[in-house]
Image (tube, rainbow, N blue to C red):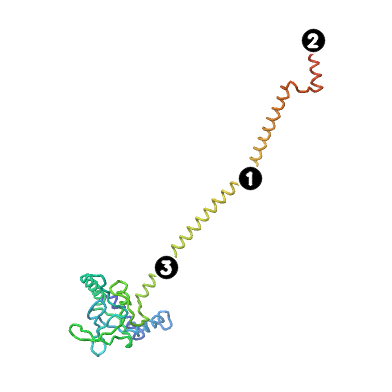
Amino acid sequence: MSVRNLLSLALVIGLTCGTVYVMGDEAAPLVEEGSDFAEEADETKALLDKLTITMISDVIDERTVVIRESSSQGGRQVLRLGNVAPIEKGSLSVEEYNERLEAGKSALERILTKKMVWYKVASADHQPDATESVHGKLEEVVLGDIWTTEGRHINSLLLKEGHVVAAKHYEEELARDILQAESEKQKEQSYKDLEEAIKESEKAKAKVAKEEKAAAKKKAQDEELVEPIGFAGYIGVTVLFIIVVFSIWTGLQKKKKTSPNRKRGPLERFWNKLKFLGSHLS
């Protein structure tokens, strides 16, 4: 066990025994009454009062271990993980099935062998009331739950990794990660929730920006269709109107001059007579 785990374990054991003190010129309580940490310590103490701390001395199979009991009765106990069952052979070959079982046992050995753990035995109503041969000796087997000193729930861990399958033996309110493991899981979940919230926020912002861009484009198109002519436009229309009218008037005047059958006015007839007399007099 690492030094860090030993220190953590010592603090936890201290919490289960009562107030923790530090040494100095005068002994002083490490946890002040009424503080948030004191309340958390009380909750931790209440939780650990339901559990027993022990050492794993041997791993029998993927869901069975031998623990050292602190009591003077017997000194050891065979404990089987509750609410889990061995994997089924199904279509697996004998070799494949044995490899799966050995992998489960190896996983349990890696996590628990010669390690301090917390455990809780299920109530007597849910015990199998049976004995099994362990290393050539008949021993009573009890069902229960095991946690590492950090609080990792071994039953759930093996189930998650696929070394065992779910079963229903009894109800256990603490069948989950507890202590430090629970806090780390909650922190990890908080980070995931925050990351997901940020992603959703970015998606929402991108959607709003896209909608605003589309709305601005549509507005510009609508304004372009109904945009008023303006002063310059009126000038242009007026000039065009004058040109058209002048062209029409010019055409009419030319038509009047070139038409042989048009009727002459008095002034025009008088002027023509003057021109005729002037040409004869000359």
Residue on which the image places disc 3:
193
237 relative to 167, above or below: above
Classify residue 230 by image quadrant. top right
> On the picture, is 90 further left or further right than 42?
left
Q: Quadrant of the C terminus?
A: top right
Which image quadrant for residue 91? bottom left
Tell me what residue is drawn at x 75 percent, y 22 percent.
261
How many numbered badges does the structure rendering display? 3
| N-term mark: 1 or 3 | 3
- Element under label 1? loop
Seen from this angle, which residue lies furthest bottom?
A: 73
Q: Is residue 80 visible?
A: yes
* Residue where numbered disc 2 is placed: 280
Whether residue 69 is situated above or below residue 178 in the rendered picture: below
**Is residue 111 placed above or below 134 in the rendered structure?**
above
Classify mark 2: residues with Cα within 10 Å, few (<14), some (14-19) or many (20+): few
Please, which residue is most extreme toward the top here?
A: 282
Q: Amino acid at mark 2?
A: His
For badge 3, the amino acid type reads Asp
Marks 2/1: CA–CA distance: 66 Å
Label 1, label 3: how far apart the Cα atoms are = 53 Å
User: In this rendering, would 105 be left or right of 215?
Assistant: left
Disc 3 from disc 2: Cα separation: 118 Å
Viewer can see residue 150? no
Outermost residue to the left: 136
Q: Nearer the viewer, residue 117 or 31?
A: 117
* Residue drawn at point x = 43 percent, y = 66 percent: 194
Q: Earlier in the sequence, mark 2 or mark 1?
A: 1
- Which of label 3 and label 2 is nearer to you? 2
Q: Which mark, by number, is residue 228?
A: 1
Q: Residues within 10 Å of mark 3 (few under 14, many from 20)?
A: few
